[in-house]
Amino acid sequence: MNPRLNCHVLIVDDSPILRAAIKKVVKLAGVSEDRIFEAGNGVEALEVLETVWIDLVLLDLNMPIMDGEQFAIQLRQRSDVQDVVVVVVSTEANRERLERMRALGVERTLRKPFEPEDLCRLIADVLGIKSSNSAST
């Protein structure tokens, strides 16, 4: 069983089905449900950031209205949220686009489809938490 993570996570993806799947994995990683927020595009995500402190954004790139790259640009222009950790979770394979995302301060990328264990491990890594998946009981 993973320890409870005292952090707030924002899942940004235009697919409600994928948001639900990612949310389930984030809960498995130890984040309580009341600390998980969702947005269907970059505009909605920026609105969430106006009202809630977020530690980690799990960001899709290919979305309508405002895509993940546009969101990351807006995010990095705001001094109040520049320390937010951003991880791209996307089907995007374009190297140039992914390099632009790294230049915008994206911590890591995880390619969809992914294994739940990989996302759990990634969350622990980027938030600086030691994995406790070993048998220690």
Image (cartoon, rainbow, N blue to C red):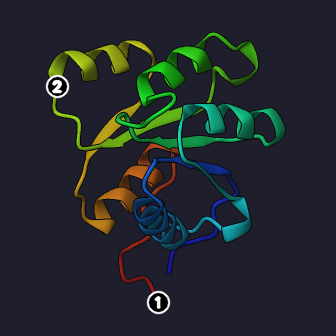
The residue that appears at 61% across and 64% down in the rendered structure is: 31
Amino acid identity at mark 1 = Thr
Q: Looking at the image, which is closer to me, 47 or 37? A: 47
Disc 2 residue type? Asn
Give me the C-alpha separation between circle 2 and circle 1: 44 Å
Q: Is residue 50 left or right of residue 122?
A: right
Helix or strand or loop: what does disc 1 sit on? loop
Q: Residue at x 57, y 68 (%)?
A: 30
- Mark 2 sits on what residue? 94
Left or right of residue 94: residue 80? right
Residue at the image point whose x is 42% and y is 22% from the top: 69
Q: Residues within 10 Å of mark 1 (few under 14, many from 20)?
A: few
Query: Please, which residue is most extreme toward the front here?
Result: 65
Secondary structure at numbered mark 2: loop
- Of all residues, the one furthest to the right in this rendering is 51
Q: Position of residue 75 (x, y in %)?
A: 60, 21
Q: How many marks?
A: 2
| Labelled disc at residue 137 | 1
Instruction: Look at the picture and state if 51 lies above or below 83.
Output: below
The first of marks 2 and 1 along the sequence is 2
Residue 82 position within the rendered picture, expressed as x and y whole percent measured from the top left? 64, 20
Residue 94 x %, y %:
16, 25
Mark 2: give few (<14), some (14-19) or many (20+) Cα within 10 Å.
Answer: few
Residue 107 sits in quarter: top left
Frontmost of labels 2 and 1 is 2
Relative to residue 31, is residue 53 depicted above or below?
above
Quadrant housing residue 91? top left
Instruction: Please tell me which residue is depicted at 32% across the width and 14% down the height of the picture.
Output: 100
Q: Quadrant of residue 68?
A: top left
